[in-house]
């Protein structure tokens, strides 16, 4: 024999019931449960070392983006300020230590890529 | 004439503000109308919360320290020099190098420092994780700990309604300690006692500086066997006998005293004559809305050095920096500030080694404690190891 239980619903409980009813009636609830299950499984299977490695990769990408953006803005500003250099002007640019540092970096970068080809 | 913006201090507040200013004022920079300079007394940038993980062997420390120049946009001139004088009448800062740095707008962001010597015996008898050296020392002690008592104490500034650095850190580290000792298999033999002073900020005889959290903490601590004691304001430590004394006349023995020590503003700010804080603590009198130093029309401040009631935390600075930046930009462009800080603080607290609790509050609303979660812990980890640097660089 089933028992009748009276529950006094709060407005919040009624709202949840209405919204859930709508999800059941429109056939969406099963899909949502599947989605939640997948999300939950992902959280369950993820470990701190996995997150550390992912985060490290994101940090590398962000750092590379920051360095590149800085350099591009600088180059744009300098290019706008100065005329296109002559061949001799090019050599003068190469006298600058920071330019040489950057160029050497690019050459090492090229080698780094070459090593992987 | 180029307008000069000078930022003193290359920590969380100074770095975020310098980069956000450069981003905001790019058109003016391109037109050669303004220059942004930062002076800091350190070549490196320290992510301070990392020290908590060092104390529990979850990090070595180097992961949280980076070259300061690498975090600044190229539009920010960076000079390593220690500010030794602030002259707000003639608008310049003097460096230890002897150089003078003139400004049209000044941002003071020199943070705060540990002042353990303000409690007799604390320097010798106590430990804290508020610096990397301190955290490394603690880690060694925790490693050796097999039995005994860890006593947690918290001190507040004497100036009313000002928090110590990172209000939630004593709770976070108590929970982390519980997890760490459990992992090590010695938790049953180590007693953890979390104590809190009679007067915190808005709460008397509680366990936290805001009432809603203070009320839920006893149940949380009980559930993990952490003893808790209100009304214990650390006043003296006997380092030889390992006894902590309180202003209220009680004493407690300990094997390790994990303390939140007294904090004061940086020396240059304390000597500037700008502060009205008690006992030479040096907090800068700050307009809670504009974030200007009170009485000075062209000096802004944010971060740990202010005298506001909000948490001295990165999650505070992340919101304050936008107000400072927008106001300086508006002053340059329209002649008056336009933005107002609402006291918003957003953070994820590390409640134990693998549980993260999102929290937010502002001048009007206290923190509403929410359950911590594994996912929250991952987000916190992401912030510690990557998102922090992006935020410091003004990328988010
Ligand atoms: C253990 C610990 C845990 C924490 N946990 C959290 C957390 O979970 N969440 C959170 O949001 N916040 C946390 N915080 C707080 C957060 O780290 C600080 O609020 C933040 O670092 C303050 O930034 P700041 O720029 O005001 O000061 P700082 O970051 O301390 O920077 C001050 C800078 O000024 C420089 N300086 C000082 N004096 C001079 C001078 N005379 N001349 C030139 N330069 C000078 C210093 O070298 C430094 O670079 C924690 C802090 C600690 C220590």
Image (cartoon, rainbow, N blue to C red):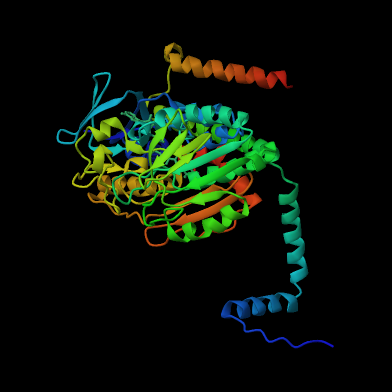
Q: Is residue B317 above or below residue B96?
A: below
Task: Kindly indicate the quadrant of the structure image that contains residue B106.
Answer: top left
Q: Quadrant of residue B363?
A: bottom left
View extreme (left): residue: B89
Report the side of B327 relative to A48 (left or right).
left
Report x, y in % for residue A3. 78, 87
- Place of residue A6 in the rendered image (x, y in percent of width and height, measured from the top left): 68, 87
Instruction: Report the residue that reaches farthest toward the right.
Output: A1
| Viewer-side residue, B333 vs B70 | B70
Q: Residue at x 25, y 46 (%)?
A: B285
Q: Relative to B302, is B45 on the left or the right?
A: right
**Residue B74 or residue B205, whichever sits in front:** B205
Residue appearing at x 47%, y 57% in the figure: B214
Counting from the top left corner in percent of width and height, residue B3 is at 25, 36
Which residue occupies the foreground of this view, B46 or B297?
B46
| Picture layout, residue B364 above or below residue B64 | below
Residue B388 can be seen, yes or no: yes
């Amino acid at each position: 024999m089933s028992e009748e239980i009276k529950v006094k619903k709060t407005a919040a409980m009624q709202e949840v019931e209405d919204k859930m009813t709508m999800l059941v009636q429109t056939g969406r609830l099963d899909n949502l449960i599947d989605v939640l299950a997948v999300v939950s499984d992902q959280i369950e299977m993820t470990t701190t070392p996995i997150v550390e490695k992912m985060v490290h990769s994101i940090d590398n990408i962000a750092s590379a983006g920051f360095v590149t953006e800085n350099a591009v803005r600088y180059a744009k500003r300098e290019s706008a300020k100065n005329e296109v250099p002559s061949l001799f002007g090019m050599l003068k640019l190469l006298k600058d230590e920071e330019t040489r540092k950057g160029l050497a970096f690019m050459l090492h970068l090229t080698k780094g890529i070459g090593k992987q080809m | 004439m180029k307008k000069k913006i000078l930022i003193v201090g290359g920590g969380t507040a100074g770095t975020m503000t310098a980069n956000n200013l450069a981003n905001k004022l790019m058109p003016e920079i391109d037109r050669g109308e303004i220059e942004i300079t930062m002076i800091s007394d350190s070549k490196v940038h320290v992510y301070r919360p990392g020290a908590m993980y060092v104390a529990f062997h979850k990090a070595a420390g180097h992961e949280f320290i980076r070259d300061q120049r690498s975090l600044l946009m190229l539009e920010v001139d960076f000079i390593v020099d220690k500010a030794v004088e602030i002259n707000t009448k003639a608008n310049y800062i003097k460096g230890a190098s002897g150089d003078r740095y003139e400004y049209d707008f000044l941002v003071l962001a020199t943070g705060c420092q540990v002042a353990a010597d303000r409690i007799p015996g604390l320097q010798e008898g106590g430990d804290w994780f508020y610096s990397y050296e301190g955290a490394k020392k603690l880690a060694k002690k925790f490693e050796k700990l097999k039995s005994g008592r860890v006593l947690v104490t918290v001190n507040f500034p004497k100036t009313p309604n000002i928090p110590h650095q990172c209000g939630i850190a004593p709770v976070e580290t108590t929970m982390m300690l519980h997890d760490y000792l459990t992992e090590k298999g010695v938790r049953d033999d180590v007693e953890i006692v979390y104590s809190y002073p009679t007067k915190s900020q808005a709460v008397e005889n509680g366990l936290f500086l805001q009432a809603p959290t203070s009320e839920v903490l006893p149940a949380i601590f009980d559930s993990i066997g952490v003893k808790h004691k209100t009304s214990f304001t650390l006043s003296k430590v006997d380092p030889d006998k390992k006894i902590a004394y309180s202003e209220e006349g009680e004493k407690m023995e300990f094997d390790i005293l994990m303390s939140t020590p007294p904090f004061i503003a940086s020396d240059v700010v304390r000597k500037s004559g700008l502060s009205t804080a008690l006992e030479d603590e040096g907090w800068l009198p700050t307009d809670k809305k504009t974030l200007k130093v009170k009485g000075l029309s062209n000096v802004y401040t944010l971060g740990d050095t202010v005298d506001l009631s909000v948490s001295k935390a990165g999650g505070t600075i992340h919101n304050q920096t936008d107000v400072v930046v927008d106001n300086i930009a508006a002053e340059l462009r329209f002649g008056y500030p336009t933005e107002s800080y609402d006291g918003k603080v957003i953070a994820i607290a590390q409640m134990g080694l693998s549980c993260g609790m999102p929290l937010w509050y502002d001048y009007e609303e206290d923190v509403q404690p929410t359950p911590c979660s594994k996912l929250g812990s991952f987000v916190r980890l992401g912030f510690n190891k990557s998102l922090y640097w992006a935020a410091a660089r003004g990328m988010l």
